[in-house]
Every structure is written in C-alpha cells, then in structure tokens.
C-alpha cells in the first residue's frame, strides 16, 4: 500500500532525473561538436536553448469543473497531503475565484502574485501581463508560519462588489445572461478581486517541474478566453471534476463539450480524465459494501456514457476522505477513497506522455544535427581506414610509383575543387528561395493581416460582421501557410538534387535532408478557428457587448495566432540554415581527406622511414573517432530511455 501512495511523486522524480541526465549528455555532445568545429553559431545556440528548455521543462495538470465540485480539495489530496493540513482553502460554496497556477521558480522568492481584475479593461492578455510584473500585486509567503500562509492563500477566493456599469465594462455581467450574477439590493455585483494568481511555492513536486492550474467555474472559463485558447490546450493532463451525488449536470456537460474535450483534442495526448468526486456521499452504513460498490459503478458507467468516453477514463474518488486517509495514515480509508487509482493513472500515463513530447522535441531540434555528426564521424573513420591502407601498401614501393600516385590524387583534388565552384552558384539559388519563404512568414507581413482584420471587425458591429472578419483572418493565415509549404517543397527538392549529385559522383554518404513540416502549425491554426466558431455560436456572443468581444476574444486569439507564426518563422529559419549542413560537412570532409592523403604521400616521399610514424598517428586518431561514436550512441540511448515504473 505504502508503495502506491507516492507513485506520482516518484514518477515526477524519475522524469526529472531523465531530463537532467539527458541534459548532461547533450552538454557533453555540444562540447565535442564545438571542439571539432562541426556546428555553426546558430546550431550552437539551438543546443543551448534545448538544454535550457530541458532544465526548465514543466508538466502542467489543469483541473476544470463547475463550481463546488471539489477541485481544490482534490489538489490538496493528491499533491499537498504531506503538509498534514489543507494547503489551499476549501469551504462550502464557491472557492477558487480566479485561475490559479501553482508552480516553483527558484529565481523568485516564495510568493503569491495577483493580477487585479481591473486589467480586464485593457487589451493585454494574461500572458503579456506575465512579462510586465509591475502590474501584479506580490505577497511574500512566510514559510515558517503555516497559519499566516494559509490565510494569504485565501486571496484567491476574495471577491468585491462593484457597480453594474463597472461589471459590464469588465465583461463580467450582462442583464441578458440567463445564469449570470444579479445585482443586490444596492445595485452592486460581486466579482473576483483578482483576474489571475500565480503561487510560487517550494514544494518538492513543484520543484520537479509540476505546474497545477486550478480554474474557476463555467463563467470564468467563458469570459477569459486565454484559458481555453492557450492554457488548457497546453496542459499535459486535464482533470474534469464532477460530483457523484449529482452526476453530469447540464452545466457540467456544457463545460465538458465546450472546453475540456476541445483542449484534449488539441494536445492529441488523450491526457484527460473525468474524476467523479464525492463518492463518500454514496456511502451508507445501512447498506452493504457490495450495494455501495454497485451504486458507484453504475454512476461511473453513466458518467462515461453521457461524456462519451470509456469507463476506464472515469475515476470515482473521494478527495476529502483521501486527504484524511493520507493525513492520518489510514490506508483502508485511502484505498476506499479511490485516490490511489487516480494517482497511478497520472504517474503511469501522463508522465510518460510528457516524456514522449520532450523526446520528440529533442529529436526535432537536434535530431538532424546528430545524424550529421554521426555521418561525419563515420566518414572520418572510413577516411582514416583508407589512409591506413594506402600508407601500408606504400611499403617497398619506389619513389616514382609514389610520385605517380600523388599526381593522380592532385588531379582528383583539382577536379573536385572545380565542382565546388559550381556548387556555390547552387547555394546562391537556394539562399534566394529561403529568403522568399521567410518573407512569407515574417511577423511584419502577419501584423499587416492582423491590422486589416481589426479594421474590418471594428467597422462591422454585427455578429455576421464579426464572423466574416474572423473567417477572413483565418483564410489569410491559411493561404500564407499553403504558400510556405509549397516553397518548402521546392527548397527540399533542390537540396535533394545536390545530395544525390555528390553521392553519385564522389561517394559521399547518402543522407536524407531534414524535412520541415507545417502540420503542427496548420493544425493549431485550425483549432483556433474552431475555437472562434464555437465562441461565436455560444450564448456569450449573444449577451456580451461586441466591443468586449473584440477586446477580449479577438486580441487573445490573434495573440496566439501570432505566437504560432513566430514559432513557425523560427523553425523555418533554423531549417533553412540546417538543411544544407550535412552535405556541406561531408563536402568539407571529402576535401580534407584528399588533402590529408596528399600530405601523407608528400611526407613519405620526403622520408620513406616515416611510414611507421604515420601509421601510429592514424591508429591513435581511429581510436579517438571510436570514442566519439560512443558519445553519440550514449546520447541516443538516453533520449530513447523509458522511465522506470513509478507505482
């Protein structure tokens, strides 16, 4: 039993260790390729950025639910039970009033950073505000005083009353909203005090890279589009929390279909589960254990049916009883709470999925570079063997024979140098094609599309006008991606021809040029468009003033689209510089080989007795190349190493 209690913690520890060891292997690899002059400045920077991303990598788990489903208690039970008390505040009724991120950044002191609700009046997204700390209220956490710290955590549940006009301006009230808040007798509306909270806390799991996103209920998800456009789709796991005593209500189903399912489809990792919380409400001392288990099973199956997912994706739990079981070391209660099965799901499925994402990123970032250096080492080994054989065969040869061999080799080198001159003309054409592609992806061009769309939408104060503006925007973005895709294929075809030519004529290793795929970017743009369509058809579109729609939704959505184009531009730039690297490296290696063979013949001509010395030098070089092969193989093994079982 005890071995399962901390399975998620162990899984996170294994993942952190894998990242650290992989980072060390890549650092070793980087030192070697720098020493061998096998990378350009851009590639060197790419490796540095990859190492930094490995060290700072985060695994995000988001919790989504309607109000009063027990999300915060579930966070306390799974992640913070070792404090023997509730770390985050839970009480009857509404708890978390603003999206709250729990994480740890060693560069910052333990604190709570709070973004005032008034920032909703501006056009800046939460992400943009994160880059401007001046606007945040920061409260330092007194780690030595748990009571005071718990009191400070209550900031995330704080509310205040504002007049109706203020609530409308904040986008948090509309008289037409059927289920929205209503003014009190003083004509005031209760709103959250804070728009967003970031808790920087030195908990062991958070230090290992875990980030927990606790979201408020339906209204906040709808009125803060950044949650659904950016934050939820980027989470590795989304826990959708329901209450066992109510089952899937109408509002639960709306949250599921509108937010959770789309976020899960966006990350393609199936990293979402439904948590049927509060099963202790079905416990009845007057009924037998079998009857209670049957009731829970029926409710679980019905939940799966309504949500349209497999039974194995629904986890019946009691967060409250699980928390008590952990605090009191009551293993029977903990087992009965169902919490262990959920923790094992997170450790066995979510963490390995995150590792796979990081593994794919490493391969995407430096996979081609590794293939290139591996080919260079192989070429050098082959060249060294060739030189060894040549020198050994010179034993007993006359100077005239050696002179004739040197003359033939010099002629081969001269012919090769002329080929390189024509190759420079091909490179010039390739550079021009790359320039065209990167111009299409330039942020300046994309900003032109954004500005035109903004003008069109501001001139069309109707739902149809807003819809047409969005359609025009995404049509323009998609057309640009299509042009970039065609340009990329042309570049790839040109490079393929160069590779094939040098392979056929000079025996250079046959390496496939790096591919550049736009699939992930086009899929993300399509998801954003679907998000726009869903938002346009939602009740919020009908009841919210149009200027608020533009300032909130459009800015958030276009900000994300701009990030996609910026990332695509960065990747395309790196690809355009890297696609020729393998053939350039092999061209240099072949040229160096010819020069070294000539140098060997020259030295033998000058002193026939030096052959033994040259053989020894080459054999030492061969041993060093075998060690370099081992460096590459070790790193590849570390990249593909699976995590040990956490449970």
Image (spheres, helix red, strand yellow):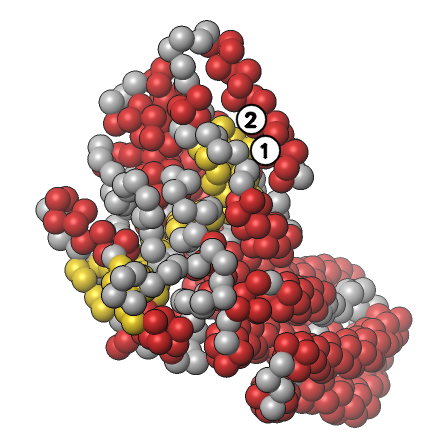
Q: Residues within 10 Å of mark 2 (few under 14, many from 20)?
A: many
Which of the two residues, 235 or 240, is positioned nearer the viewer here?
A: 240
Above or below, 184 relative to 579: above
- C-beta proximity under 8 Å, tags 2 and 1: yes
Query: At which x and y percent is residue 189?
Result: 32, 64
Query: At which x and y percent is residue 329?
Result: 27, 21
Above or below, 176 relative to 295: below
Query: At which x and y percent is residue 267?
Result: 60, 54
| Left or right position of 19 against 303 | left
Query: At which x and y percent is residue 25?
Result: 48, 54
- For label 2, the residue is 299
Residue drawn at (26%, 45%) of the image: 89
Q: Which mark is residue 303?
A: 1
* Mark 2: secondary structure: helix
Q: Is residue 200 visible?
A: no
| Left or right position of 343 against 597 | left
Which of the two residues, 342 or 462, is positioned nearer the viewer here?
A: 462
Q: Is residue 93 visible?
A: yes
Q: Which mark is residue 14?
A: none
């Amino acid at each position: 039993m005890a071995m399962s209690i901390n399975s998620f913690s162990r899984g996170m520890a294994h993942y952190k260790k894998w990242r650290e060891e992989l980072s060390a292997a890549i650092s070793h690899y980087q030192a070697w390729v720098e020493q061998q002059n096998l990378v350009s400045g851009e590639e060197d920077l790419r490796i540095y950025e990859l190492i930094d991303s490995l060290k700072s990598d985060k695994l995000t788990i988001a919790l989504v639910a309607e109000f009063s489903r027990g999300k915060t208690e579930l966070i306390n039970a799974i992640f913070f039970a070792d404090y023997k008390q509730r770390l985050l505040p839970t009480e009857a009724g509404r708890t978390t009033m603003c999206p709250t991120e729990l994480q740890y950044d060693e560069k910052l002191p333990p604190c709570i950073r709070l973004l005032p609700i008034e920032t909703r009046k501006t056009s800046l997204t939460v992400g943009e505000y994160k880059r401007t700390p001046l606007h945040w209220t920061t409260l330092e956490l007194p780690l030595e005083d748990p009571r005071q710290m718990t009191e400070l955590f209550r900031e995330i549940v704080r509310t205040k009353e504002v007049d109706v006009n203020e609530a409308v301006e904040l986008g948090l009230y509309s008289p037409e909203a059927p289920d929205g808040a209503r003014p009190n007798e003083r004509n005031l509306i209760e709103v959250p005090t804070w728009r967003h909270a970031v808790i920087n806390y030195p908990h062991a799991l958070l230090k290992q890279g875990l980030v927990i996103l606790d979201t408020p209920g339906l209204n906040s998800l709808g009125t803060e589009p950044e949650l659904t456009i950016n934050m939820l789709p980027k989470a590795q796991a989304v826990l959708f929390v329901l209450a066992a005593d109510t089952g899937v209500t109408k509002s639960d189903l709306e949250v599921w279909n509108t937010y959770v399912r789309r976020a899960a489809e966006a990350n393609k990792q199936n990293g979402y589960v439904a948590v049927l919380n509060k099963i202790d409400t079905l416990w009845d001392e007057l009924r037998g254990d079998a009857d209670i288990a049957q009731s829970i099973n029926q409710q679980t199956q019905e939940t799966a049916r309504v949500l349209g997912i497999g039974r194995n994706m629904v986890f019946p739990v009691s967060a409250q009883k699980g928390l008590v079981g952990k605090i009191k070391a009551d293993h029977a209660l903990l087992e009965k709470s169902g919490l262990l099965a959920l923790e094992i799901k997170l450790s066995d499925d979510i963490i390995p999925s995150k590792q796979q994402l990081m593994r794919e990123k490493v391969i995407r970032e430096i996979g081609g570079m590794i293939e290139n250096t591996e080919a260079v080492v192989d070429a050098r080994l082959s060249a060294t063997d060739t030189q060894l054989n040549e020198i050994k065969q010179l034993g007993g040869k006359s100077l005239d024979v050696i002179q004739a061999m040197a003359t033939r080799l010099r002629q081969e080198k001269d012919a090769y140098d002329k080929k390189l001159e024509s190759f420079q003309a091909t490179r010039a054409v390739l550079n021009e094609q790359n320039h065209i592609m990167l111009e299409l992806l330039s942020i300046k061009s994309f900003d032109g599309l954004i500005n035109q769309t903004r003008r069109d939408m501001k001139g069309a104060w109707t739902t149809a006008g807003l819809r047409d503006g969005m359609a025009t925007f995404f049509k323009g973005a998609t057309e640009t991606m299509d042009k970039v895709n065609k340009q990329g294929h042309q570049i790839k075809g040109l490079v393929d021809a160069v590779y094939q030519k040098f392979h056929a004529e000079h025996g250079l290793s046959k390496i496939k040029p790096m591919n550049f795929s736009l699939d992930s970017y086009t899929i993300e743009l399509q998801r954003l468009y679907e998000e726009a369509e869903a938002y346009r058809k939602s009740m919020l579109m009908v009841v919210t003033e149009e200027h608020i729609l533009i300032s909130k939704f459009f800015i958030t959505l276009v900000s994300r689209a701009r990030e996609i184009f910026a990332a695509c531009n960065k990747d395309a730039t790196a690809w355009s510089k890297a696609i020729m690297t393998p053939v350039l490296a092999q061209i240099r290696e072949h040229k160096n080989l010819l020069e070294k063979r000539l140098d060997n013949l020259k030295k033998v001509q000058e002193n026939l007795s030096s052959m033994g010395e040259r053989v020894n030098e080459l054999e030492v070089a061969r041993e060093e190349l075998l060690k370099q092969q081992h460096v590459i193989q070790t790193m590849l093994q570390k990249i593909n190493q699976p995590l040990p079982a956490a449970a």
